[in-house]
Image (cartoon, helix red, strand yellow):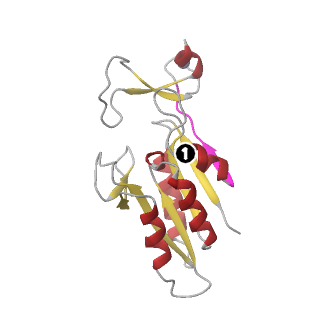
Amino acid sequence: MLNIEVITGGMFCGKTTLLQKKIREAERVKFFKTYVFKPSTDNRYSESAVVSHDGDEIEAIAVRHGMQIVHHVINDSLTAPEHKKVVFIDEAQFFDAILVNVIQRLVANGCDVVIAGLDLDSNGRPFGGMPSAMAMATKIHKLTARCKCGNESYVTANKDKKSTVQVGNEGYEPTCIKCFYN
Ligand SMILES: [Zn+2]
């Protein structure tokens, strides 16, 4: 059985926390070999770690190009034929259309793939490789936070629409679909 699992939603929804839970669970399985990757464009807190907003860290390999994930995983040999590779990718919205090829190559080589990333950008448009990953998924976790109006969030909006330069999570807030389009 092969799985392509996608964890998505806006910022502040707990995507990285759920990804870390799944990494820790996979690490407990003796016949799994786990790999954690993230795009090197994301260096908010650490160059070489997946970092959740509560500071809980898991080591990750930062890659500049999606196909580096494929080369790294496929060239790494397993110690036993019954072992299985499980590949985790955080902040996957920063990979473009190449994410489709990355997923296909990994699954064709017998890997499970778990992908976390933003589904929408702050303009409410599908973000990078994530829409394709969601279409290919065997399982999707679409998480939400809460808008300050009380509704479940739909998108992460700029607090100040005039400001164009944004670093990290500051300046963004979870926003419901009604508040976003009003
Ligand atoms: Zn709202």
Farthest residue to the right: give it: 1
Considering the image in quadrants, where does the N terminus appear? bottom right
Residue 124: x %, y % from top left: 52, 27
Answer above or below: position of 7 versus 27: above
- Left or right, 48 with respect to 127, comes to left
Q: Nearer the viewer, residue 156 or 130?
A: 130
Q: Quadrant of ligand 1?
A: top right
- Left or right, 137 with respect to 144, comes to right
Considering the image in quadrants, where does the C terminus appear? top right
Answer above or below: position of 37 versus 129: below
Residue 17: x %, y % from top left: 47, 49
Q: What stretch is highlighted in magenta?
A: 138-146
- Amino acid residing under circle 1: Met
Q: Name the residue under label 1.
A: 130
Q: Nearer the viewer, residue 2 or 106?
A: 106
Answer above or below: position of 150 versus 88: above
- Residue 85 drawn in magenta: no
- Left or right, 97 with respect to 56, comes to right
Q: Tell me which residue sits at (46%, 68%) in the image.
A: 35
Q: What element carries label 1?
A: helix
